[in-house]
Image: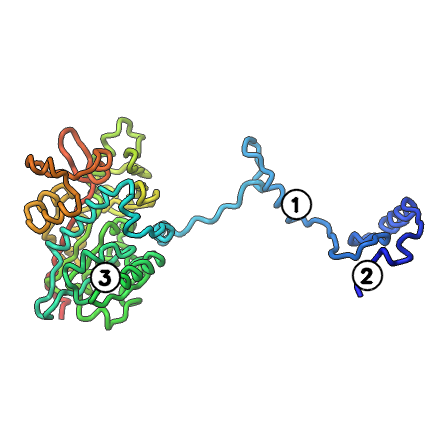
Amino acid sequence: MAYDPLKDPDTFKSFDVHKDQAEHASEASSSSKPRPYAPTWRVSEPKSVAVPITSDEIEQFKRRSRNPLRDDTQEFQLPVRRKRQDSETGDSSMVAMHYNQRREVGRDAREYSPIIPLKRFNNWIKSALIAMYAHSSGTRGKGGRVLDLGCGKGGDLRKWDRQRPAHMVMIDLATISVEQAQDRYKEGNYRWPADFFTFDCFRRPLQDVVPMALLEPKFDTVTMQFCLHYGWDTEESARTMLSNVSKWLRPGGTFIGTIPDEETLFARLDAQPEVTDLSFGNENYRIEFEERHESGEKPFGNKYRFWLEDAVDDVPEYVVDWATFERLAKEYGMQLIYKARFDQILSDGYANKNLRQLLERMQVIDPNMAAAGIVTPAMPPAMWEACSMYMDTDSTALYLGFAFERIVTDDDP
């Protein structure tokens, strides 16, 4: 039966509170050890025991009470900061976290993006590179095998579907992005097989993660769209990536991709009025360098942060030194067959009937300007600057596309 103090006859006996307190005070002074708070005159059943606050708790309260307006803050009052991550994995983790946190909104909702004209243009650029330089193996009787490094959420699945691939292996360092790519693949009801993996191709060999049964026969095309610049921090990272591409790309196969153009990056940075100005951009995009270097001075690790409205949230990237990139690619058995900035790719693609029709269907170009013989994207100037830079009267694209062909080397069987 539960204890009821109202039915206890001892509850209402008279007692001298002051006398009782004095007795307990005397007992406390005679004892060297602190005792829990437990008065004998209480009428309710104890549910917990109060204990003195600890020294750690006192320090915690001190940290919480730090006044940010004071300049005499003591060291222990400063917030505890997380240790800086190792540079070899820190930026990769940051990039993965960024893309993992970006919400998948669906195809219909993407049409309402504030930069939808820019996204359409970039998608057409990738379609053009795929159409012009994705090689198929005629000996297999159907489309070629494709390795997509940096596949993201699978936004290029439909582009590759037009090429009727025999098989695709899709890899990205962002786990959630890979899961979303798998969902897109399943929802698309594609008639060709695809396998998905999560890992960083700049840090580890493919064969560490991808089963050999999926790496053989070698791929006809390797694609890296808008991602190669994330891993250009060290020569070791670049060589690991190029080894992954070259080792599993068949002779005659192609390596295609898109990256920021270093010449345009440096030209735009040099155009700033003060040498201490390390950033440029507008309401749609912004680029901020950590420090200023001349072209070729720092072939690896030349870091900047990039923000693009509704797409990229201040993510670290690296300038891809083109001369170094081409030299290393040749060292790994790949020779350059195409390099063009986006404005030139637009011009080249417009000369192709199929790609010109795709431009019109995707509403990429201004039809009135095209009728007058001027091929230009249908987007505001500030948005076009996010993929091109205006220097005087010339339009110089911020991004470029490339294609390398795998040549036969002494190491090939």
Seen from the viewer's position, the closer of residues 375 and 212 is 375
| Residue 34 - label | none
> Dot 1, how many residues are within 10 Å of its Cα: few (below 14), some (14-19), or many (20+)?
few
- Residue 33 at x, y percent in the picture: 80, 54
Identify the image quadrant of the N terminus.
bottom right
Q: Which residue is mark 2?
A: 3
Seen from the viewer's position, the closer of residues 332 and 20 is 20
> Dot 2, how many residues are within 10 Å of its Cα: few (below 14), some (14-19), or many (20+)?
few
- Residue 226 at x, y percent in the picture: 24, 49
User: Mark 1 and mark 2: span between their CA atoms?
Assistant: 37 Å
User: Mark 3 and mark 2: span between their CA atoms?
Assistant: 75 Å
Q: How is the image coloured?
A: rainbow
The mark lying in front, picked from 1 and 2, is: 2
User: Which residue is pictured at 17% across the width and 31% down the height?
Assistant: 391
Instruction: Confirm whether residue 105 shows in the render.
Output: yes
> In screen coordinates, is 372 left or right of 217?
left
| Residue 244 - label | 3
Q: Which residue is mark 1?
A: 58
Secondary structure beneath label 2: loop
Q: Amino acid type of disc 1?
A: Ile
> Dot 3, how many residues are within 10 Å of its Cα: few (below 14), some (14-19), or many (20+)?
many
- Residue 16 at x, y percent in the picture: 93, 47
> Is the C-beta separation of discs 1 and 2 under 8 Å?
no
Instruction: Confirm whether residue 266 shows in the render.
Output: no
Q: Amino acid type of disc 3?
A: Asn
